[in-house]
């Protein structure tokens, strides 16, 4: 019997042989949709739902954010975890020393950043090699992926990115600006706020492949076929990442590697503790966390800041914290970064910056 994998190979071959132009676009669209759906069936078997994560590993995320170290075996993931956190993950001079998910907590700028050390992955991980599926399921639940290699395995970076992609992880990519509203009747309607290079026929036949007969599809970007397929599939995760090259104490090989998808790799030595501060700063930057200090009376709590996602308004922040007499608060005074002058009065739509001091007033 033909397996999903054989079928995928056939369809991929057909795409390769078909020249891409206006006349073939909707045919290629269909083929891509079929591939995506077949892959999805495989992924679903491996990753039962996104929530809870783990896919076999019972892990729980705590803290302000979660980071996962993904890379080939023996590059020093466990050594790095032990350096950055209180964890004691087993280190070995042989492959697959780590067999489970080992959590550690990094205290940084008043935030608690959970780091997961996981088994190394090899090519074919997404389709089940080693502990690949389980590792990638953990990665899907992270806020940031650290792709970790050492100076001898730099050439494996594209493979790791490929495995993550197969597992539905999109790195440094924006979520497609597509909304799909299912309707009881009326066929497929496409509304776009910008001109589209894809034709209506292509979009409609793609919708058909995803068993959508009646829907309004609102598209707010000049979308590509691949991104539209992702939008229809709906369960992709869009994550930031950073590439780390370890063991620079062994030489400078690999230092010439260029940017990867616009990101400069960070060169470290976990063993000798080199460049770990730079790495922490990068992790912080890419998690897009900020610290907000609350002021009550004359007292500013610099020791335990609120650690929140950048871009939230005071209203959204208030919704998520417990504060005495919250209902009675109606404006705020701000000091420091983001304030035009110390004590500026602002409404709850104010968006604080890193280290803004906020005093809620009733
Ligand atoms: N020279 C050097 N060796 C390192 C460094 N970091 C780790 N190692 C060594 O590399 C080997 C593998 O380290 P681990 O931390 O176990 O690597 P891992 O990536 O967790 O490996 P798996 O769990 O098998 O996937 C050990 O012998 C470490 O002592 C480093 O910065 N420099
Ligand atoms: Mg390990």
Image (cartoon, helix red, strand yellow):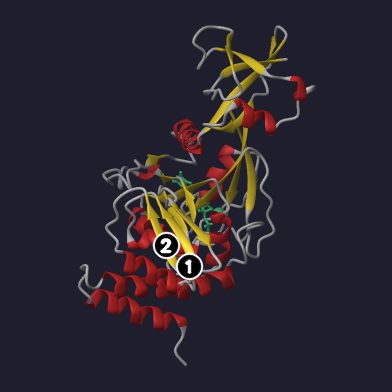
| Residue corresponding to mark 2 | 189
State the residue lying farthest toward the bottom.
1
Which label is found at residue 297?
none
Residue 32 vs residue 169: left or right? left
Of 315 and 77, nearer the camera is 315
Residue 60, image x, y percentages? 69, 51
Q: Position of residue 82 (x, y in %)?
A: 59, 43
Q: Nearer the viewer, residue 335 or 229?
A: 229
In this picture, residue 358 sits left or right of residue 274: right
Which picture quadrant has residue 300? top right
Q: Percent from the top left, x then y, of residue 164?
A: 45, 59
**Residue at left 44%, top 59%?**
217
Give the camera-side residue of 254 and 271. Answer: 254
Q: Is residue 237 visible?
A: yes
Ligand 2 quarter of the rendering: bottom right
Mark 1 residue element: loop
Within the image, what quadrant is residue 246 found in?
Answer: top left
Q: Residue at x 58, y 53 (%)?
A: 141
Say which element carries label 2.
strand
Q: Residue 47 placed where, x, y %?
A: 59, 66
At a point 61% along the width and 30% down the height, the residue shown is: 307
Q: Is residue 182 above or below residue 248?
A: below
| Residue lying at 34% horizontally and 70% vertically, measured from the top left | 29
Residue 235: tell me if it is visible. no
Q: Are marks 1 and 2 in contact (CB under 8 Å)?
A: yes
| The residue at label 1 has a CB less than 8 Å from ligand 1 | no
Residue furthest to the front in view is 186
Q: Which disc, if any, is residue 186?
A: 1
């Amino acid at each position: 019997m033909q397996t999903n994998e054989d079928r995928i190979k056939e369809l991929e071959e057909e795409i390769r042989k078909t020249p891409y132009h206006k006349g073939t676009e909707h045919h290629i669209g269909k083929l891509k949709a079929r591939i995506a759906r077949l892959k999805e069936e495989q992924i679903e078997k491996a990753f039962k739902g996104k929530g809870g994560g783990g896919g076999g590993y019972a892990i729980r995320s705590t803290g302000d954010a979660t980071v996962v170290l993904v890379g080939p075996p023996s590059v020093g993931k466990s050594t790095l975890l032990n350096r950055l956190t209180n964890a004691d993950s087993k280190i070995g001079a042989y492959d697959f020393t780590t067999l489970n998910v080992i959590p550690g907590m990094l205290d940084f700028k008043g935030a608690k950043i959970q780091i997961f050390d996981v088994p190394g992955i090899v090519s074919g991980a997404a389709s089940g090699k080693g502990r690949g599926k389980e590792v990638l399921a953990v990665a899907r639940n992270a806020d940031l992926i650290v792709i970790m290699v050492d100076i001898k395995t730099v050439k494996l970076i594209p493979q790791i990115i490929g495995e993550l992609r197969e597992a539905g992880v999109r790195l440094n990519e924006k979520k497609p600006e597509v909304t799909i509203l299912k309707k009881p009747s009326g066929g497929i309607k496409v509304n776009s706020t910008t001109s589209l290079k894809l034709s209506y026929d292509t979009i409609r036949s793609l919708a058909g492949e995803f068993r959508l007969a009646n829907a309004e599809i609102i598209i707010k970007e000049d979308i590509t076929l691949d991104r539209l397929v992702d939008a229809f599939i709906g369960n992709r995760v869009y994550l930031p990442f950073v590439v780390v090259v370890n063991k620079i104490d062994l030489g400078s090989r690999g230092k010439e590697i260029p940017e990867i998808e616009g990101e400069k790799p960070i060169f470290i030595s976990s063993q000798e503790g080199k460049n770990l501060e730079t790495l922490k700063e990068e992790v912080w930057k890419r998690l897009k966390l900020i610290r907000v200090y609350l002021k009550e009376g004359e007292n500013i709590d610099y020791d335990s800041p609120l650690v929140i996602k950048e871009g939230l308004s005071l209203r959204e922040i208030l919704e998520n914290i417990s504060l005495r007499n919250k209902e009675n608060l109606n404006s705020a005074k701000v000091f420091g970064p983001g304030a035009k002058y110390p004590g500026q009065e602002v409404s709850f739509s104010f968006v604080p910056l890193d280290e803004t001091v906020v005093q809620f007033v009733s």
